[in-house]
Image: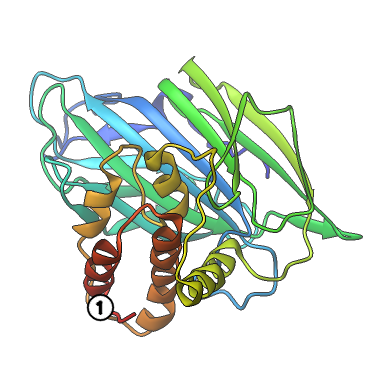
Amino acid sequence: MKVFQLAMSFMLLFIFQLPGLAGAEDKSNVLNMEELTIQVMPEYSYHPKDKKKNPPLLVGYHGALKNNAEQPQKGQVVIPLPMDEENFRIGFAGDYSRDLTEMNEIEYELDQDKGTISWETSEEIQPGEIYKFVIEYYTDSISEKDGTKKLAYDFTSFTEIGLLNLIFVEPLNSETFKLEPASEQQQKNSYNMNMFLYQSQGMKAGEAKNIKLEYKRTDGRTTAEIMEDMAGDAKKAGTVKQNDEKMPLWLVITVVGSVTLIAAVLLIFFMKRKTKPAQENAASDIDPKKAKLRGMLVEGSITETEYNELLKKLGGRK
């Protein structure tokens, strides 16, 4: 994955543009990126419109911005994305209400020339308040030759970031999985899903993280599809096996859930997420979410009652 660069200074790459300032000087860096978690998930799931030919790569940005101005702010957020990557497409974009009880699927604009995504905040951001957003995108950046799959993931910070969490999630049923340089932390959840974490505090604009991944995997199913199969098998057996080395619930949900946020109350957000009216490909878009819910049920992260309630909110049945 190539490092993406824009024809502007790093200080202008991340902009909060205030409304009603025509003819006035633009204000930049009104919001500071307190925390950014990036999840890199090879072969986790396909985009709803994919034809399932190439190994998919799902990447999620989960950001927390702080309003450092003395006045409430509501306006346009602009974030750069690697749109020059092969078959780049957005999977989901959303932000959270002020009380963090609802997720709003946002209407966004893509600027292919500048390589940015932009949207209007759903609500005013009060002074000192945290504003959280999620952007998920897919690419075909994984190469394959002689049974070996490779990915070069490069991230260049587009602004100052208080804390960067970079998480690589190993697809289920991988035969080998090697990261270079090696991760700082590694854990497993009760699905035996390996997660590798890199952290950087006080990351400056222009600083980069360059990770090379090489792995072997012959299973043609995605991780989401495998979890759906496992959920069906566990339901038939009537038992759920738990791994002794279980990761924190927030991280399990962060990885398992398609729409996520770095907080222990993620489940509440997911339950109260607002969804758009059904559209042409609604069935194919919602099936992966049902599969992930089944996975969470088998995981033991949610109860049968919670699973049924979540499923109702997706408009589906067991």
Q: Amino acid at mark 1?
A: Gly
Mark 1 is surrounded, within 10 Å at the Cα level, by few (under 14), some (14 to 19) or many (20 or more) other residues, namely: few
Question: Looking at this view, is 120 or 217 the one in front?
Answer: 217
Which quarter of the rendering shows the N terminus?
top right
User: From what the image shows, is residue 167 above or below residue 205?
Assistant: below
Among all residues in the image, which is located at the extreme right? 146
Among all residues in the image, which is located at the extreme top? 202
Report the number of numbered marks.
Answer: 1
Q: Residue at x 44, y 35 (%)?
A: 37
Q: Is residue 5 visible in the rendered structure shown here?
A: yes
Q: Residue at x 60, y 25 (%)?
A: 208
Q: For the residue labelled by badge 1, is the local secondary structure a helix, a strand or a loop?
A: loop
Residue 31, position as x, y percentages in the image: 26, 26
> Which residue is disc 1 drawn over?
315
Question: Looking at this view, is 60 or 262 the one in front?
Answer: 262
Residue 258, position as x, y percentages in the image: 42, 57
Q: Residue at x 22, y 70 (%)?
A: 313
Q: Residue at x 53, y 37 (%)?
A: 6
User: From what the image shows, is residue 232 above or below residue 7?
Assistant: below
